[in-house]
Structures are given as structure tokens and as C-alpha cells.
Image (tube, rainbow, N blue to C red):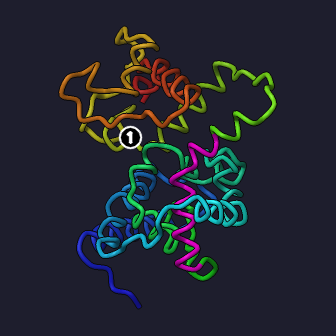
Amino acid sequence: MKIPTGRSIGIEFLIASVVLLSACTAHQKPSNVETTLANLAKDIVIPVETENLRNPLTGNPQEASEGQQIYQQSCAICHGVDGHGHTVLGQGMYPPAMDLTSPHVQHWKDPELFWIIQNGVRMTGMASWKESISPEETWKLVMFIRNLTEVNAAQAAKAPKEEKAVRTPAQLNAYGKTLYRQEGCFMCHRLDGEGGKVGPDLTVEGTRGRTAQWLTGHFKDPTAYVPGSIMPSFKNLTDEQLNALTEFLLSQKGEGHAKR
């Protein structure tokens, strides 16, 4: 049995405590505390566990191609063929299955992605694949995930031009809410009294007079709009994702908070 060390003891203890208090049922939507801790587990426990791991692969196209085959067999059911997580199973999880092309995922180092795939992350729906995917195959899978954005762009260029269905404002707002959770925005920002306090409270973001164009530009290059900002760039998000996240934030006018 592996004994956790360092920061992993603290986060696992907190997660275990919340699980016990919530009666351990999977039929109810986890509380905001559970969801926050589950996301924190990815960003706190994982780096501690990967200090001595090194990617042995060279990054050649063949390795990424073989990784793609493994991905289609084992990962696409939750994360989708394109990695965006828009599947029934992926969206039914709390938190939802991560968008593998997002900055939240792409900022992880190769050893961290390797560790997640091999070990899974408790309370997030991400299972351990150690018993069915070998270490060598896992590294190839990591290489493919690294190239997902480029793969999607190449496939889109080859596909016949089809008119894409336009989301309604309500659909765009709902998608933005999902992205707000997937991208971990709540870890730094508060919304309706819940979340971190590193960045501004977003409860009334829609009343601040900022345009959709300003918010989209800010997501792409935060320091160009707010000098000295420590917010990471979200350049990896597609235009549709940026529009959805912007639509969601502009809809935040404090009504829900006022009713509490």
C-alpha cells in the first residue's frame, strides 16, 4: 500500500472528510466544497507525485499516431474524439470531463499527464488506467494529448465545409457555465459567494460595463488589458468557447446572489 506524503496527505484528508460527511453517494450532485477539492487535487497532489518522472519519448509523429489509437479506444468515450469532453458520459460527471485542449490541461507537464492517466484522480471521474495501459503506451498517449489542438485543426481543414449549427444564447450561456468549471475559474474568482479570492468577484460582472470584445481580448492576453495581471492566458480556447465563457460572465448581474 502506498503511503501519501507531503501536501498529498492534506488534500486527501480533506477530500476523505467531505466524502464521509456527504454519505458517499454518487446519485447526488457533489457540493461546491467537494467539487473545489476535486479540482484542487489535480493541481496540488499531482505535481508532488511527479517530481522524479521523465518522458522517455522523443516526440516523433509515429509516437503521437500510436497514442491517438490508444486515445480512441480508451479516452474518447468521456473526452470526445476531439478532446473537448462534449459527450453524454463526460458532461454527466461532476466536475465535467476536462477539455484536453484547454489551458487548464495543457499547462500540465508530461510527467503530470502521465501520472493522471496511470493513477486517476479521486472524486473527479478520472479512473486509473494503470492495469490496462502500459507505461510506454501512456507516454504515447501523453504525446497525442499534447498535439490535440494541431490534430483537430488538420482534420477540420480536410473535412468538407459544412454550415455549423449556431448555438442559441441559452445554449451558449450553459456551455459557458460548464467552461467556467472546467477551466478552474472558480479557484481564483468568487461567483455568488463561492470560489477563491485571488481575482475579482464575478457575481456582478455583467453590470461592470465591459463589452464582449473586451472580455474575449482579456482572456487571450490578460496583461494587455490589465497591467500586472497574474491571470493565465486562455489562447487555447476556440472562438466559440471564448464567446460562451464571455456570454456566461456577461449574464452575471447578481440576481442569484441577491435571492440567497
Q: 60 and 190: which one is in front? A: 60
Residue at coordinates 78% horizontally, 35% vertically from top-left?
Answer: 159
SS of the residue under disc 1: helix
In magenta segment, residue 224:
no
| Rendered view: 107 above or below 61 | above
Task: Give the vertical position of 4 relative to 175 (above or below).
Answer: below
Would residue 147 be counted in the magenta stretch? yes
* For residue 134, side relative to residue 57 (left or right): right
Q: Main secondary structure of the magenta part?
A: helix
Which residue: 70% across, 54% down? 89
Q: Dividing the image into 4 quarters, which one contains the N terminus?
A: bottom left
Identity of the residue drawn at 49% across and 74% down: 119
Percent of width and height locating residue 4: 32, 80
Rendering quarter of residue 67: bottom right
Give, as a single range, the part of the protein colored magenta. 134-152
Q: Residue at label 1? A: 186
Residue 182 position (above or below residue 237): below
Place of residue 116 in the rendered image (x, y in percent of width and height, measured from the top left): 47, 67
Check the image and report above or below for 46 versus 84: below
At horizontal 81% and vertical 30% (from top left) the residue drawn is 160
Taking depth in this image into account, of 209 and 23 the one nearest to the observer is 209
Foreground of the two, 20 or 106 = 106
Question: Going by the image, does 21 lie left or right of 159?
Answer: left
